[in-house]
Image (tube, rainbow, N blue to C red):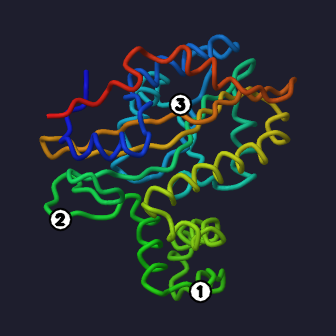
Amino acid sequence: MNTKVRPEVAKALRDNHIDNTVLSGPLYVATNKVAGQYGLTQRDVIFGNGFCPDEIKGGLKAPFVDNYSWREFDLCRVDGILKGSDMVSAMSHHAPDDGGFIVLNAPHVSVNSNGEFGKIIRYGQDVETGCCGAAMGYLEKYTGGDRGEPELEDVLSAPDSFDIAADYDTYVLKKVLYPHMDEITKSRIPQLALTQKLYELIAHDFDARSSGILSEGGDVLYVSGIEYDVQTVDGGVENLFAPGKVIFYSDTKEPVDVTDVFLDVLDENTGRCIQEV
């Protein structure tokens, strides 16, 4: 089934060479096929959720959560940033005997009905908001002149201790992006450039943490990419996944880049899941 979008949405994706997106069904099938080739079967796998907690992103993870009987391990902060080495280590220790994890990890950005990146009308609302809200909010503040380096003290000094955890996630996002913000704001589409840069940083971070930590136990098929949340012609939102690097981490071998294998087994709808209406 194709996602019906306005021509402006299709053009925005096409003009920015975003032509390899897939829906949740093909993503689920391809991920499981590749995982099976490397010894990870559905009965001994836990789903590692590397998506932003934003409610708009639920579509891509739905078949994984449903078919893994809700065996889900939450790995990430806002916009797909890892919670840290302790969390990756905990994931490793939770691996089933002779099993492991499938991890989907992706930042996200929306495309509204006019083909603009970073804005979307959410379910039940009439006004556009940012998406990813935290990332687009930081971009707006930075371009508006608030260019100071993020300070941890600003988070720790919150008057209510319950605010620290929530504010810390946003702080981490800003801290990760800060060294790249001048480059991002000078790009043709800053909202897209920010998301693409964040994808690179997240994938590198997972590799840096996981190569050592995952040797403690359990194999992992790590599927990275970018999620594009597109406005459909009926006013809804469809989640599309553009795959990036796919790495198989083993507790007995060096990491293996299986990106080409993954792309080879993707569903035939790859790149053809958009229908202009």
| Image quadrant where residue 100 sits | top right
Classify 55 as above or below 71: below
Identified by mark 2, the residue type is: Val
Q: Nearer the viewer, mark 3 or mark 1?
A: 1
* Element type where label 3 sits in the image: loop
What mark, if any, has residue 148 been given in the picture? Answer: 1
Instruction: Residue 74 in the image: state x and y as whole percent.
Output: 56, 45
Q: Quadrant of the N terminus?
A: top left
CA gap, disc 1 to disc 2? 30 Å
* Element type where label 1 sits in the image: loop
Q: What residue is drawn where x is 34% and y is 64%?
A: 130
Left-right relation of 165 to 128: right
Residues packed near mark 3 inside 10 Å, few (<14), some (14 to 19) or many (20 plus): some
Q: What residue is drawn where x is 65% and y is 54%?
A: 201
Confirm or deny contact between disc 3 and disc 1 (CB under 8 A): no
Classify 140 as above or below 55: below
* Element type where label 2 sits in the image: loop
Q: What residue is drawn where x is 69% and y is 40%?
A: 91
Residues packed near mark 1 inside 10 Å, few (<14), some (14 to 19) or many (20 plus): few
What mark, if any, has residue 71 been given in the picture? Answer: 3
The tag earlier along the polypeptide, 3 or 1, is 3
The tag earlier along the polypeptide, 2 or 3, is 3
Left-right relation of 266 to 235: right
The tag earlier along the polypeptide, 1 or 2, is 2
The residue closer to the viewer here, 88 or 34, is: 34
Residues packed near mark 2 inside 10 Å, few (<14), some (14 to 19) or many (20 plus): few
Q: How many marks?
A: 3
Label 2: which residue?
A: 127
Q: What residue is drawn where x is 42% and y is 84%?
A: 144
Identified by mark 3, the residue type is: Arg
